[in-house]
Image (spheres, rainbow, N blue to C red):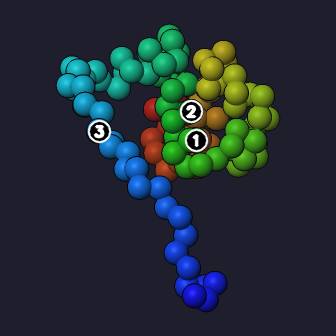
């Protein structure tokens, strides 16, 4: 028999696989409650900024360059450590194409 036509030794054992049982879906919670559990008591303006930035796939550095603010200030705004002023809110709104009052 030629070498390339030989059958390779195979293991005859077949492992059985059982699908894990699905647990019933628990009561759902609204997004604000989920955000509070995930991020603590962050102001909604900070959550809005972080969410929009992530949705657009921007880094803090890229967003800072787009609106003329340092990355460290974007970080402080996202953590709720720095308030977002009207001028910055309007720049953010223009960047994300939304109403600026979302950040106030």
- Residue at image point 68% right, 43% down: 59
Q: Kindly identify the residue that appears in the image at 69 percent across and 22 percent down.
A: 76
Which of marks 2 and 3 precedes in the sequence?
Answer: 3
Q: CA distance from mark 1 to mark 3?
A: 38 Å
Mark 1, residue position: 53
Using the image as rendered, state which of residue 74 and residue 58 is in the foreground.
Answer: 58
- Examine the image and state in which quarter residue 16 appears: top left
Q: Please, what secondary structure does the residue beneath circle 2 have?
A: helix
- Residue under label 3, please give it: 19
Q: Position of residue 12 (x, y in %)?
A: 41, 55
The 10 Å Cα crowd at callout 3, few under 14, some 14 to 19, many 20 or more, is few
* Direction bottom: furthest residue: 2
Horizontal side, residue 78 vs residue 71: left or right: left
How crowded is the residue under tag 2: few (<14 C-alpha within 10 Å), some, or many (20+)? some
Q: CA distance from mark 2 to mark 1?
A: 5 Å
Of residues 101 and 44, the one nearer the viewer is 44
Image quarter of the N terminus: bottom right
- Report the residue that reaches farthest toward the front: 1
How crowded pointer 1 is (Cα within 10 Å; few <14, some 14-19, many 20+) is rated as some
Report whether residue 67 is seen.
no
Kindly indicate whether the residue at mark 3 contacts the one at mark 1 (C-beta within 8 angstroms): no
How far apart marks 3 and 2 lie (CA) works out to: 37 Å
Mark 1 / mark 3, whichever is N-terminal: 3
The residue carrying mark 2 is 50
Q: Is residue 83 above or below residue 100?
A: above
In what element is the residue under mark 1?
helix
Left-right relation of 35 to 24: right
Give the residue drawn at x 60%, y 17%.
80
The image shows residue 45, relative to residue 65, as above or below, that is above
Q: Is residue 100 visible?
A: yes
């Amino acid at each position: 028999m030629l070498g390339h036509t030989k059958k390779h030794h195979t293991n005859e054992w077949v492992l059985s696989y059982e699908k894990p049982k699905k647990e019933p879906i628990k009561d759902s919670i609204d997004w604000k409650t989920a955000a509070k559990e995930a991020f603590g008591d962050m102001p909604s303006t900070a959550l809005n900024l972080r969410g929009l930035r992530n949705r657009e796939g921007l880094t803090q550095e890229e967003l800072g360059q787009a609106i003329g603010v340092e990355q460290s200030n974007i970080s402080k705004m996202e953590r709720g450590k720095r308030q977002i002023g009207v001028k910055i809110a309007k720049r953010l709104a223009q960047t994300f194409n939304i109403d600026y009052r979302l950040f106030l």
